Image (tube, rainbow, N blue to C red):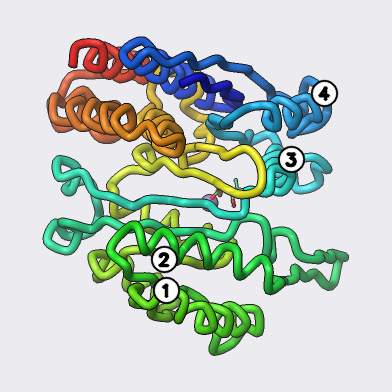
Amino acid sequence: MKLNIAVLAGDGIGPEIMKQGVAVMDAIAAKYNHTFTYNEAICGAHAIDEVGDPFPDDTFKACMEADAVLFAAVGDPRFDNNPTAKVRPEQGLLAMRKKLGLFANVRPVATFDCLLHKSPLKDELLRGADFVVIRELTGGMYFGEKYQDNDKAYDTDIYTRPEIERILKVAFEYAMKRNKHLTVVDKANVLASSRLWRQIAKEMEPQYPEVTTDYMFIDNAAMRVLTEPTFFDVIVTENTFGDILTDETSCITGSMGLQPSSSLGEHTPLFEPVHGSWPQAAGQNLANPLAQILSAAMLLEHFGLTEEGQTIRKAVDASLDANVRTPEIQVEGGAHYGTEEVGAWIVDWIAKH
Ligand code: IPM
Ligand code: MN
């Protein structure tokens, strides 16, 4: 297969983990006779530095022309610590999601047996937890009307019927492919926007008679994902709730460094780690490349390259089993492996198996 991939490495640890993600894609291309071509484009803080825009038109064009976008992370403390900054790296991320119409963010939550001890939760609660959170990504408070003066500020949590229907359709279809259990997470006891979500979900339920659909308030869901993570199969929720819930669910996996995601919608699909740009670690060969590498696996699987995706997943499992791990998940007394070494080990494993 020929795939043209827009590569957006972004800021902080982005370029280091991206290098490993691309190396793994190349190892797959060589093994299975595919042709992957890469088109690098700038975004985030360094795009602000270079051209004054965190998601420049040239980058948008590169994304639109590609079959898929492989994205790393954006963000820089220079902007976080300056509340008056007019342009911020995160605006580039939001512009990218909006312009590419990436309304469905799929964030799988899985456990790795050998990392259960890294989670703050008890082993017996976690074992077997395996679900996906489908987060609506281009609506709600993130994009609704905003206002701010010295005495008053608001954000508007607005959703329209077509926006709700299309994300619920993705979620029901995901549930059909998995264990046919969908949990719609909302705050329908308080928020009008949530009541419309719930109404539309109930209207759609009869189209998916095989799916068991339940409804859960976000506050309750925030507790249930930690007390009974095995209850869930597919969760669907609005933008802000999904943002918060997926940082929380990263505790189930044991490290943010292990969580990939895909964002799907109207234009080019995008694949990125859930974690951020970890600027403090930039350039130190410390960051875990696995979320980036697993995002590459999701990219390949999206195009039907199931075996190729599985090969990457097996290589990742093998690296963990061999204790070839970056410091934040390394076992006590284990050898030191950096971003580069973990990536190289995985590339080598793929070539040999
Ligand atoms: C995420 C991030 C972003 C979000 C930030 C960086 C704008 O936290 O992808 O979860 O809030 O969506
Ligand atoms: Mn987030």
Query: Along the polypeptide, which appears first: circle 2 or circle 4?
Result: 4
Q: Nearer the viewer, residue 176 or 101?
A: 176
Where does label 1 land, which residue? 208
SS category of the residue bearing label 1: loop
At horizontal 53% and vertical 57% (from top left) the residue drawn is 243
**Which numbered disc, 2 or 1, marks the residue closer to the eye?**
1
Asked where in the image residue 9 lies, by quadrant, the reply is top right
Point out the tag, 1 or 4, that comes first from the N-terminus.
4
Residue under circle 3?
88
Which element is circle 2 on? strand
Dot 4, how many residues are within 10 Å of its Cα: few (below 14), some (14-19), or many (20+)?
few
Circle nearer the viewer, 3 or 2? 2
**How much space separates mark 2 and mark 1, taking CA atoms?**
15 Å
The disc, 3 or 1, on the residue closer to the chain's N-terminal end is 3
Q: Check the picture and name the quadrant holding the C terminus.
A: top left
101 relative to 73, above or below: below
Quarter of the figure with residue 67: top right
User: In terms of secondary structure, where does tag 4 sit?
Assistant: helix
On the image, numbered disc 4 is attached to which residue?
Answer: 51
| Vertical relation: 54 (above or below) 84 | above
Q: Mark 4 or mark 3: which is in front?
A: 4
Amino acid at circle 1: Tyr
Q: Nearer the viewer, residue 263 or 229?
A: 263
Q: Is mark 3 within 8 Å of ligand 1?
A: no
